[in-house]
Image (cartoon, coloured by chain):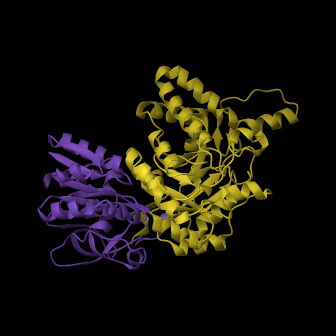
Chain colours: A yellow, B purple
Amino acid sequence: MELEKLKFGTELIKRGFAKMQKGGVIMDVTNAEQAGVAEDAGAVAVMALHKVPADIRQTGGVARMADPKKIKEIIDAVTIPVMAKIRIGHVTEAQALEALGVDMVDESEVLTPADVFFHVDKRKFVIPFVCGARSLGEATRRIWEGAAMIRTKGEAGTGNVVEAVRHMRLINRSIANLKEIDEDGIHKVAEHYAGSYVKLLGDIREEAGINREITQKDVVFEEYTFEDIVEGLYRELLEIRDIQRLTVVNFAAGGVATPADAAFMMQLGADGVFVGSGIFKSSNPADFASAIVEAVHHYDEPEVIAEISKGIGEAMKGLDVFLLSEDEKLQTRGV
Amino acid sequence: MRVSVIGFQGDVEEHVIALNKSANRLHLDCEILATRKADEIEESEAIVIPGGESTTISRLIFGDKISDIIIRLANEGVPVMGTCAGLILLAREGDEQVEKTDTQLLGLMDVRVKRNAFGRQRESFQTRLNIKGIGEFDAVFIRAPAITEAENGVDVLATVDEYVVAAKQDNILAFAFHPELADDTKVHEYFLRMI
């Protein structure tokens, strides 16, 4: 093959990979055996991690990228794509996963953030990224940074779908809302969304006692000026307004625990579903996995949902999100 | 005239969009339908099996018996196009990955396929191909399969290295890449002309 004639890691290839996952279920797994269960159940991909979110919540401490040895075992065990999580902003974990042959990186709030200022500049990678979002602002920023897929953050490890529903509704309604504002208005939204990139420079100036506003020409993130970012977000928002959906695939994640939860998220407009703790924290993982796959494919057929939900055993116990303190919530990480 | 895109999983919508554009260009009066319902597929004059995960799509089309309908219509001469995962499902024989996962195939094309023939996502690529009967095409390969063996009745339309990446056998058309992701509708127009 003449290598110079081949292009790798283009936006089309990255976003295309994410599109192939549509209508599918991506399952969290912690070892090769679980990955096999997921593949047999019809998962379109698996997410390799050290512990499922429910256990991360229980154990506490710093949650990091999984052991590459474990990830490699999972890669070798299944034929479907393998994704893995990195800490928000942890460029080196992402590079390590790319070197390992992981098919997609999840820059995830479920792990302990590594950078309080920035997310990874995802355009600099050959493999695609998925990122969580609670709002249109978070989603647009991640897409501008190069994410090929967005998922709701929800509230991982709770088995409680309420936050995923909240985030899906917020994003969808915000997209519809763009039709009601003119282009000047959308430009102002882009400027507002770009605000979170100036924190580092702002902190530096404040610490140095320099009382100067951030200007258009200030380089604020990687090689990009504030103006580059505003214009990038503006173009992204115009396209989102025109097509009335995100410009990349949008999955549901963070609290999906039952077949009905998964189907509900599809009815709300999700392109597919991530199931984290929901499968391997249930009483019967293989049956739960198959039932959730079926539910996603037949999300608009209530009689099918009723049938596959019969006697599949107990869903994970779950947590009431409203009883969690702000510190205990994972979704507030990485805006 | 109805063209059905088998709509269980994968980039179904992208095929619908490309087919609609192609039908407009060819001035064909077509109903392009993304569907997983047996009675709707039954009434099709052409069928597309999209890209996605072949393990997942196979499980669903065989589970819902949609497979029987596709096989019967194909044998009656209805044009069927498969892209990427769709190519795998059209094949008669698979490699060890297909066997290991017990993936059932439709067996409509006399070829042997290799899954993930070019490697993982890191190795996914775009390249310019010259496709026999279709012309120059900017092809996107995503964890793409390839045809490793083809019997006499199979017309090879394009290759990359030793691999066959586009092929036609009578009314069956298969591509290892994703014409539905390109802006170019040449491949879909070629398919619609087969009806």
Name, please, the residue furthest toward the front.
Answer: A311
Query: Image point 57% across, 51% down: which residue?
Result: A257
Q: Is residue B63 visible?
A: yes
Residue B85 position within the rendered picture, expressed as x and y whole percent measured from the top left: 35, 63
Q: Depth check: A49 or B182 in front?
A: A49
Q: Within the image, what quadrant is residue A142 found in?
A: top right
Name the image quarter holding the N terminus of chain B.
Answer: top left
Q: Depth check: B61 or B98 in front?
A: B61
Number of on-image labels:
0
Q: In the picture shown, does residue A56 fall above or below B156?
A: above
Q: Depth check: A72 or B190 in front?
A: A72
Q: Is residue A16 visible?
A: no
Q: Within the image, what quadrant is residue B17 found in?
A: top left
Q: Is residue B47 left or right of residue A256?
A: left
Residue A320 position within the rendered picture, expressed as x and y whole percent measured from the top left: 69, 43
Q: In the picture shown, does residue B154 fall above or below A63?
A: below
Q: In the picture shown, does residue B162 fall above or below A273?
A: below
Query: Image point 26% across, 55% down: which residue?
Result: B48
Q: Within the image, what quadrant is residue B104 found in?
A: bottom left
Q: Is residue A58 left or right of residue B73?
A: right
Residue A3 position within the rendered picture, expressed as x and y whole percent measured from the top left: 43, 68
Q: Depth check: A233 or A168 in front?
A: A168
Q: Is residue A291 left or right of residue A210?
A: left
Residue A184 position within the rendered picture, expressed as x and y whole percent measured from the top left: 53, 20
